[in-house]
Image (cartoon, helix red, strand yellow):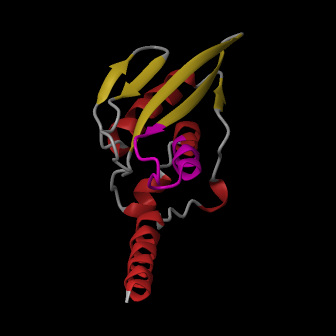
Amino acid sequence: MQTTIRLCMLAASSILLGGCLAATPVMLGPAANAGPVTCDTNCTTSWERAQLWLAKHSRWKIQTATDVLIQTYNPPEHDTSYGFTATREPLGGGRYTITLALHCANFIRCDPKESDVVSAFNYYVATGEDILATAKHGSAVN
């Protein structure tokens, strides 16, 4: 009897955990870019795009926005969405690197995959084309 109960509990736990670990896929296509964005002549436009992308796709409001930092509020404990920090670092000679860092407060999973979010952000900052809005019809990154 106890063995049957344990097997049922194990099966139920596996089903629940499996459901929790299933992430929502984001199809980015061949334009995905996981590296930071480097800009020179269009850095003002790229930095404005960074702030706009975060405003459109973060569940959390922007807390700080300066010439070198854009930061959203962080998600509450156990939330599977991301808080964001974008930085614009001078490289010299009028060139900058724009980098996105993500914070998720859920140790089991975050949704969607971090690399997909960073790639979508970088692509938008570099090109102005919002592949998340195209893929999800304007829904926020949760």
| Residue 113 belongs to the span the image colors magenta | yes
Q: In this view, does 7 lie above or below 17?
A: below
Residue 24 shows in the view: no
Residue 116 shows in the view: yes
User: For this rendering, which residue is in front, 103 or 117?
Assistant: 103
Residue 63 relative to residue 25: left or right: left
Magenta stretch in the rendered image: 103-121
Q: Which residue is drawn at 53% across and 54% down?
A: 113
Q: Residue at x 34, y 46 (%)?
A: 78
Q: Is residue 105 above or below residue 20?
A: above
Q: Which residue is drawn at 46% across and 28% down?
A: 85
Considering every residue shown, the one lying at the far top of the view is: 92
User: For this rendering, which residue is in front, 39 or 55?
Assistant: 55
Q: In this view, does 138 lie above or below 72?
A: below
Quadrant of residue 16 within the rendered picture? bottom left
Tally of numbered tags:
0
Q: Where is residue 3 in the image (x, y as percent from the top left)?
A: 44, 85
Residue 120 relative to residue 5: left or right: right
User: For this rendering, which residue is in front, 57 or 103?
Assistant: 103
| Residue 108 belongs to the span the image colors magenta | yes
Q: Where is residue 114 in the image (x, y as percent from the top left)?
A: 54, 48
User: For this rendering, which residue is in front, 36 or 137?
Assistant: 36
Residue 94 relative to residue 49: left or right: right
Q: Position of residue 120 (x, y in %)?
A: 53, 48
Q: Where is residue 8 in the image (x, y as percent from the top left)?
A: 39, 84
- In what quadrant of the picture does the N terminus appear? bottom left
Q: In this view, does 36 lie above or below 124?
A: above
